[in-house]
Amino acid sequence: MMIQPLENIRVLDLSRVYAAPAGSMILGDLGAEVIRIEHPDGSDSMRDWGPFIEGQSTYYLCANRNKKSITLDLKTESGRTEFKELVKDADIVLENFKTGDMKKMGLSYDVLKEINPRLIHCAVTGFGQTGPLAYEPGFDPVVQAMSGLMDVTGPIDGEPTKVGIPIADILTSHYVAISVLSALRMRDLTNQGQFIDLALLDVQISSLANVASAYLNAGMVSKRLGNSHNNVAPYQVFQCADGPLMVCAGNDRQFEKLCVMLGHEEWINDPRYKSNTGRKENEEELVRQISDIMVTRTREDWVEKLRHYKIPGGCVNTIEEALTQPQVIARDLIGEIEHPQYGKVKFVKNPMQRSGLNIAYQGAPPILGEHTDQLLLSKRA
């Protein structure tokens, strides 16, 4: 019998859209029983975002496998009463209402912990429970803009650009899982639950990594450099005869190998290029010379050479190319779940593979209220 790490853990998921639902999906992959709770009329706008398969939003499908769905109207006394009954046996409440909304409904953590002192309540908002923006709605593109991420993304002479996926939401979903797992471990030690205040802006600011460190410690304001790097050269996209290729010579040794590969061993001891500092100072001339060479061969030719010389690099793939490339196929990253109403659904598997965690995909994303009778009938009787 397969044992999963979060067996017997119950999550009441009141969240919508992506950041929090994708976090509870990770918990579901690990064996938690995740119960989505929505208004009877539906409250997740992701259900309305195409394209669709058999009437189901493919956007919704990407964040809601391994879950059950029930409907409750938490604005009614009966709905709140039923929710409180569920809280008695729950381990986690996850929600992403605006700050203060749970309190207005009489369902704040202070109320819920009286019902279940071991409850872990994770609240995901745009800006957190404190500060001047606490009561403002927060969406991924707004957070990308406010965090400075857009200012360092895009072409040098172009406008600040958002990342092509909801990166702030995605990163936050990971912190949902990390924080809940940590709180469960803390509960093992203290026998007490807790409240977790998780904000998209906090997550994205904390994810600025070297860009934040450069400013905080050296006063360096990173520039928008397109596909180049603020600190390393050559570390960028080059155009080949048939398309773009990313090449990352991340240290002096890799640059020396690149020089040999390109047939310019004399660059190795050239004082302009010998160190990374010199390469950054003379980057324009160096990149021009490399570009003139790279464009003479196809991407496949260069990838073969890069692998031979053990220099990091890879094709700039389309989404179709990315999802069908041999490495993805070899890693068995694409899965399929059957649903009785809308058929087979393909999805990208959880990346925590080949471990003893026993990741499982036991349920396709549910339709609205699919499990209401199953989970609430006995409580209503």
Image (cartoon, rainbow, N blue to C red):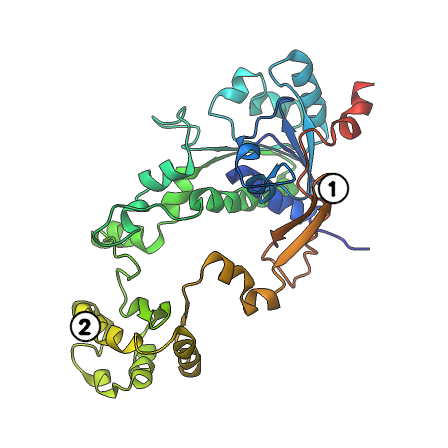
The image quadrant of residue 39 is top right
The residue lying toward the viewer, choosing from 346 and 283, is: 346
User: Left or right: where does residue 271 sit relative to residue 168?
Assistant: left
The residue lying toward the viewer, choosing from 325 and 297, is: 297
Q: In this view, does 76 lie above or below 310?
A: above
Q: Which of marks 1 and 2 is nearer the N terminus?
A: 1
Q: What element carries label 2?
A: helix
Q: Residue 278 carries which label?
A: 2
Report which residue position mark 1 lands on: 8
Q: Which residue lies furthest to the top in this view?
A: 77
Q: In this view, does 353 lie above or below 71?
A: below
Q: Residue 182 in the image: x percent, y percent?
A: 57, 45
User: Left or right: where does residue 91 sit relative to residue 57?
Assistant: right
Q: Which amino acid does label 2 sit on?
A: Gly
The reply to whether residue 323 is in sight is yes
Q: Residue 220 in the image: x percent, y percent?
A: 21, 53
Identified at 36% across, 53% down, the residue is 209
The image quadrant of residue 148 is top left
